[in-house]
Image: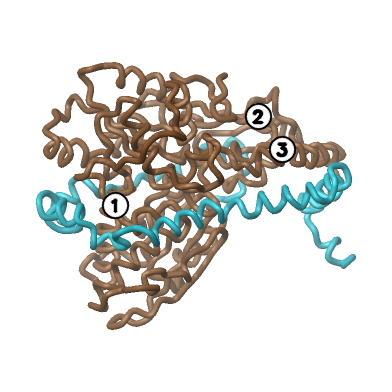
Chain colours: A brown, B cyan
Amino acid sequence: MQKIESVNYASTNAVPKADAVDKTLFVQVDETKCQSCGTCQEVCSTGAIQPKDGKDGPRTIVDPAACMNCGQCLANCPYEAIHENVSFLDDIEAALADPNVKVVSMPAPAVRYGLGECFGYPTGAYVGGKMFTALRKLGFDKIWDNQMTADVTIMEEGTELLNRLTGKDKAPLPQFTSCCPGWIKFAETFYPQIMPNLSSCKSPIGMLGPLCKTYGAEQAKIDAKKMYTVSIMPCIAKKFEGLRPEIKDIDATITTRELAYLIKKHKIDFKNLKDSEPDFDLGESTGAGTIFGNSGGVMEAALRLAYEVVSGEKLTGDAVNIKPVRTHTGVQAATIDVPKFGKLNVCVISGLHNAVPIIQEVIAGKSPYHFIEVMTCPGGCVNGAGQPLAPGTLQSSLFRSVIARMNRRFNMRSIG
Amino acid sequence: MSNDIMKLTRRQFVKSAGFTVGMCLVGVNFTKKAYAQAKEYLSERQLSVYKQDAAMKYRKSQDSPAIAKIYKDFLHEPCGHVSHELLHTHYHDRSAALKAVLAKGVKLKIGA
């Protein structure tokens, strides 16, 4: 076990073989540390984490098929009893040290709002410029920004939605977003009948991998065969996504925490770094790309495109901010008036359990919505389980462990 | 009020009991602070994202010069041929693996 930014890792060298990915638990409980408080069981959307003895003993994740790899159990455990099992850190360091390998970094939008917390910045501080400089100092040859392919995702997914609305694309409505790997596994596992409703778009990182090795390689005149792409994510489930056989050209995935670990290990003085920019061709991005990190962000970014395309009118000033879809928890429905179309009904969901009634409406053919966004983590990727643990979580750990201890007492009495 | 307490589920009861006892042990002020931190935490990172969005030169994907360039030089059009080749995917029915878990007698929060 190794501790990285207050989270335990089984090893820094733990990459599952291709045929073992579906059988791998990306997080698991250390039963010797578990105090049986039940917090993890409460936050788990599927119920994959439960008492091993069937009563109130230490918790365990029962089967990889039932776990969506979101890691909310890990992020909420008051005892640091849950660890990550998969890490590409040693692999990445070997690639960085090899002069024949061109290492490409692909940071997700949300990472730049969490990374600073590992270096003493206030919660949510934007440290994008310093992050790009730190990546260069670590020896990454290119910084191709996942935030730029968030824009590509909007062009593709927004167009797909418009094609479904006009009937040019025969796939059914409502269209669900497909960026969140926890949500995709959830739909495939529990509700495969709605797979035709999922946008056929890969996630932004699923798009960036192949774009690096085609368009990027072409623009930068790099041999794609010598390229090693590193996805940097606020998310544990993205490690699973990067290993899916149909998602190609992502060679490694690390979390925000693991990036902070690399920066500290290489003694880079993060706070005193100058700001810099990513490399242009797959680097320049927009506000629509950065809001992907928030629940409601993909929806808002897609609406900024769909509105202009359908109505032929420009969104300017405050109208660019489509506030009715901004949310931080649960289910948020909104109706947007789009000239030349009418009322566009949309829904933003965070938390997979919250998606269940909405999915059931879709299956019953009674859904009022055209477009539905689902994110696994509360508030979206910025609160993903690959981010530094909430200072709230750490600072109030005494308080939380008192509650947890009380819960355990009550649990042991088996009331109710 | 007493009726409301009766309506609590076991877990909610345990949580509120733990919360109350925690408050007694560590003091009201600390509890308030910890609670506020846990609550507002969500919005702090999110607000930072919207602040950054508002400050960016381009706010819409379709206005980005990098997007204009990649569609002109490489992808040609959204949802076109190259896009379908590289940027779109298909999904896999994983319900069999779930059924195998349920067949072992495991109970989950969500049924198949």
Badge 2 density bin: few <14, some 14–19, many ≥20, Cα 10 Å: some
Give the percent coordinates (x, y) of residue A254: 42, 32
Left of A299 or right of it: where is A277? left
Distance from Cα at disc 3 to Cα at disc 2 = 13 Å
Badge 3 density bin: few <14, some 14–19, many ≥20, Cα 10 Å: some
Please give the label number shown on residue A81. Answer: 2
Left of A46 or right of it: where is A149? left
Residue drawn 25% across and 63% down? A159
Please give the label number shown on residue A285. Answer: 1
Amino acid at pointer 1: Ser
Which circle's residue, 3 or 2, is located before the other in the chain?
2
Distance from Cα at disc 2 to Cα at disc 1 = 38 Å
Please give the label number shown on residue A397. Answer: 3
Residue drawn 30% across and 17% down? A97
Give the percent coordinates (x, y) of residue A8: 57, 26
Which circle's residue, 2 or 1, is located before the other in the chain?
2
Amino acid at pointer 3: Ser
Residue drawn 48% across and 71% down? A324
Give the percent coordinates (x, y) of residue A59: 68, 33
Of badges 3 and 2, the one in the foreground is: 3
Residue drawn 48% across and 49% down? A190
Q: In terms of secondary structure, where does tag 3 sit?
A: helix
Marks 3/2 in contact by CB < 8 Å: the verdict is no
Amino acid at pointer 2: Ala
Left of A412 or right of it: where is A315? left
Query: On what subunit does the disc labeled 3 rest?
Result: A
Query: On what subunit does the disc labeled 1 rest?
Result: A
